Image: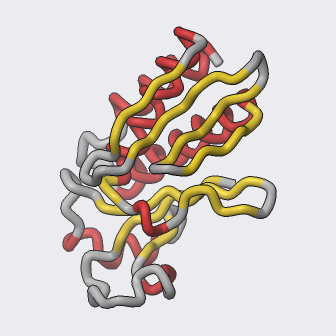
Amino acid sequence: MINSYILDPNAPKSGDLLANPRKYFIPIDDRDWIKAIEHDLDLKYLNGAIVIEYCGSTIMDYRYWDLVDQLWMYFIHLMGEVDQSGGKAQMFFPDQPVRLGLECIGKNDVLFILDDGKWSLPKKEFFQELVNQAEHFFRRLQEYFPDQDLAARPLKEIGQLKTTL
């Protein structure tokens, strides 16, 4: 399961960000909350988190919040590189020194690398879920902020990637 969140810029910044993430992070599908704070969001620097869970284990959680729209594009580019080369690709988060990588291991699996952690995942299932959730995220941005050009290029790249996976 993969979900996207936007960091509420109005939430008090305190030490319980990770202990109580629901106070700070808005699910991308919570239209009412997002619309209530839309004028406070900096859409050029949209902070948020991508939370990834697999088989009951959390692989990527709120502690890895960053520029969430850019982070989604990093995932899209990594998948494209790995899909084309059949090898591996790595980069760092947009605004943190956190390593993110994907590496093919065998025909059907991929190694997901996050910071110092590594997880072996079924490639097709993982990539499809990443692509679907990235598309969902950008479609929500397009819906919430129709006057902004936030989603056209990402959705085009996602569409191109979907044809190769």
Give x and y (percent) for residue 91.
Answer: 36, 34
Q: Quadrant of the C terminus?
A: top right
* Vertical placement of residue 159 versus 25, above or below: above
Location of residue 62 in the rendering, given as x and y in whole percent from the top left corner = 47, 68
Which is nearer the eye, 78 or 157? Answer: 78
Looking at the image, residue 62 sits to the left or right of residue 83; the answer is: left
| Residue at the spot 34% in from the left edge and 46% down from the top edge | 93
156 versus 84 height, above or below: below
Nearer-the-camera pick, 144 or 41 = 41
The colouring scheme, among rainbow, by chain, secondary structure or one colour, is: secondary structure
* Residue 113 spot, x, y in % from top left: 54, 41
* Above/below status of 45 relative to 154: below
Total marks in image: 0
In the picture as drawn, the residue positioned furthest to the front comes out as 116
Residue located at (42% from left, 30% from top): 90
Picture coordinates of residue 88 (x, y %)? 52, 21
Nearer-the-camera pick, 97 or 9: 97
Q: Residue at x 66, y 40 (%)?
A: 129
Residue at the location (32% across, 49% down)?
Answer: 146
Q: Is residue 152 left or right of residue 25?
A: left
Which of the 4 image quadrants contains residue 71? top left
Front residue of this view, candidates 81 and 76 = 81
Question: Image quadrant for the N terminus?
Answer: bottom right
Q: Quadrant of residue 13?
A: bottom left
